[in-house]
Amino acid sequence: MQSVIDQAVQVRLIATAPGSRTVPAVLHYHPADPLAVRITFPPEISLDGAAVDWAFARELLAEGLQAPAGTGDVRVRPVGRGRTVLEFHVEDGVAMVQVDTADLRRFLDRTYQAVPAGRELLDVDRGLAELLGDV
């Protein structure tokens, strides 16, 4: 079994309040959930003081590096040279962060080395066994 891929990145939180700020975040990929990537933001940027974790399609992230992608809760689009915006839509509004595109490409390259595109078969039987504690 391949190990989890974690990559620390700096994101620029885009805010309507005075000025934006840079905060750390962590990108995650687990080969057991091969279609998804996650990004975790630190507690200090959330309204309730808890870490914020978003999961979305790895393919959405890859497409969003080239052109605007997504119509749901998560949207990804390139901006200018070398930057990508991730938008997270919730009932109360939208959170937007800018990330260095090279960091996202490096992360995606590592995920595709672990599980190549088109080889994301889910082992449902193994997943159920893990949930039931039979593994």
Image (cartoon, helix red, strand yellow):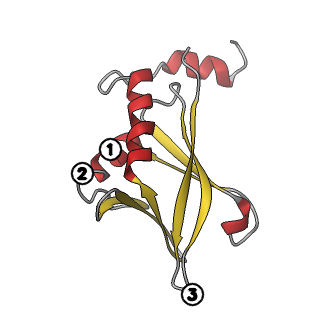
Spot occupied by residue 19 in the image (x, y as percentages of width and height): 55, 82
The residue mark sitting in front, 3 or 2, is 3
Q: Check disc 1: other Cα within 10 Å, few if <14, some if 14-19, many if 20+.
A: some
The local secondary structure at tag 1 comes to: helix
Dividing the picture into quadrants, the one containing residue 116 is: top left
Q: Check disc 3: other Cα within 10 Å, few if <14, some if 14-19, many if 20+.
A: few
Residue drawn 50% across the image and 25% down it: 31
In the picture of the structure, the residue carrying the numbered disc 2 is 66
In depth, the one of 34 and 86 nearer the eye is 86
Cβ atoms at labels 1 and 2 below 8 Å apart: yes
Spot occupied by residue 25 in the image (x, y as percentages of width and height): 60, 53
Determine whether 110 is above or below 52 in the image: above
Cβ atoms at labels 3 and 1 below 8 Å apart: no
The local secondary structure at tag 3 comes to: loop
Between discs 3 and 1, the one toward the N terminus: 3
In the picture of the structure, the residue carrying the numbered disc 3 is 18
Cα distance between the residues tagged 3 and 2: 30 Å
Residue drawn 50% across the image and 31% down it: 33
Residue positioned most to the front: 81
Cα distance between the residues tagged 3 and 1: 31 Å
Determine whether 68 is above or below 61 in the image: below
In the picture of the structure, the residue carrying the numbered disc 1 is 62
Determine whether 91 is above or below 111 in the image: below
Dividing the picture into quadrants, the one containing residue 24 is: bottom right
- Of the residues shown, which amino acid type is indicated by label 2? Gln
Residue positioned most to the bottom: 18
Residue positioned most to the left: 67
